[in-house]
Image (cartoon, grey):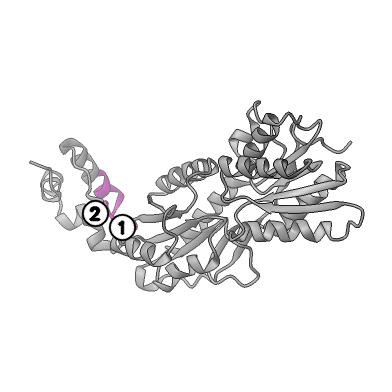
Amino acid sequence: MAVTLKDVAARAGVSRSAVSRTFTDGASVSPRMREKVEAAAKELGYRPNRLASSLTTGRTQLIGLVSNNFQNPIFLEVFDLFTRGLQARGLRPLLVNLSADIDPESSVEMLREYSVDGVVVASSTLSPEFAQAFADAGMPVVHAFGRKSDAPRTHVVGIDNVACGAMAARALLAAGYGHVHMLAGPAEATSTQDRLQGFQGVMAAQKDILSSHSFASAYSFDAGRLEMQRLLAAGPPAQGYFCGDDVLSMGALSALADAGHAVPGDVGLLGLNDMAMARWESFALSTIHQPIPEIVEACMDVMEEMLKGPLWDRPSVSPKCHVFECSLTYRKTLPAPA
């Protein structure tokens, strides 16, 4: 028979409500009472049922973790940081894969069914309206890696993708290239649109530099490889490429190697993210470093702040856009300035 709360109360010589308070976060219980209850629970092998306690507290401690690009290895790092971080804070992640369905209504309905306490939308490609759908349903929401805005309707934690595109353009110019190309991600992605805007903004002022761009079908290795193969089939390569993501860069690097082009001897290549694989010797990718651990930590801080207090009296936390600085990391695919 499973050990019950009543059994623990009898062993400790206290009321069942005292046992319940001991295992309820934030409930008032004296140190002596907590010590007696925890000792009795340990002797009996009792473990509190979190699902049952949620019926009393109104909290499930579940946080919906929603994303739409599981093909990109960067999200293995992101999910590792989120799941470990949430668990360390006493919260439990509920992972939602949107790879085949980016309709917010179905995700909202699913997370309602699980009565999640909050939602983290972890995506650089989904629009602000996607995260807003959860807020409209009454769920605390943070958009990790979301689009920068001066007046966000939900909390956003991420980077300035327009500034990153400009940074990439200046890095290619500093390398002395006369023909540069942005191999961007999918055209409909907000991150692609912003990075391209920044890239073109710098290049528009360079009258003697040939600048071009194209779009890959997805942020994936295969998409980057296919797009670079298409570009090479159409004519001589550019001197320098900014790929809108590290995994696109790796696909492009593979296609360039197959075609006999040395990197960076013949062609320079710059990525964005600085994922763990970018540091592997087989890639040694020059890239724009995005401070992912700091972004994830800030998202969890914001979520905890939103969850403070009783459900009916949460503090009014006005939506803010938390922007982290990025920096250039030079390895072997793009020469650093002298």
Query: Dot 2: what SS?
Result: helix
Distance from Cα at disc 1 to Cα at disc 2: 7 Å
Instruction: State the residue position of label 1.
Output: 60
Q: In the displayed orientation, state which residue is furthest to the right.
A: 208
Q: Nearer the viewer, residue 259 or 101?
A: 259
Q: In the displayed orientation, state which residue is furthest to the front.
A: 234
- Residue 24: in magenta span: yes
Question: In terms of sequence position, does the residue under pointer 1 or pointer 2 come before the other?
Answer: 2
Question: Residue 59 location in percent, x, y?
Answer: 31, 61
**Residue segment shown in magenta:** 21-35
The amino acid marked with disc number 2 is Leu
Residue at the spot 77% in from the left edge and 43% down from the top edge:
235
| Horizontal side of residue 48 vs 195, given as left or right | left
The image quarter in which residue 192 lies:
bottom right
Question: Residue 160 location in percent, x, y?
Answer: 68, 58
Query: Dot 1: what SS?
Result: loop
Q: Nearer the viewer, residue 153 or 286?
A: 286
- Circles 1 and 2 in contact, beta carbons < 8 Å: yes
Q: Which mark is residue 235?
A: none
Instruction: State the residue position of label 2.
Output: 51
The amino acid marked with disc number 1 is Thr
Residue 261 against residue 235 in the figure, above or below: above
Q: Nearer the viewer, residue 94 or 173?
A: 173
| Horizontal side of residue 267 vs 321, given as left or right | right
Neighbour class for label 2 at 10 Å: few (<14), some, many (≥20)? few
Question: Residue 181 location in percent, x, y?
Answer: 76, 49
Residue at the spot 72% in from the left edge and 37% down from the top edge:
286
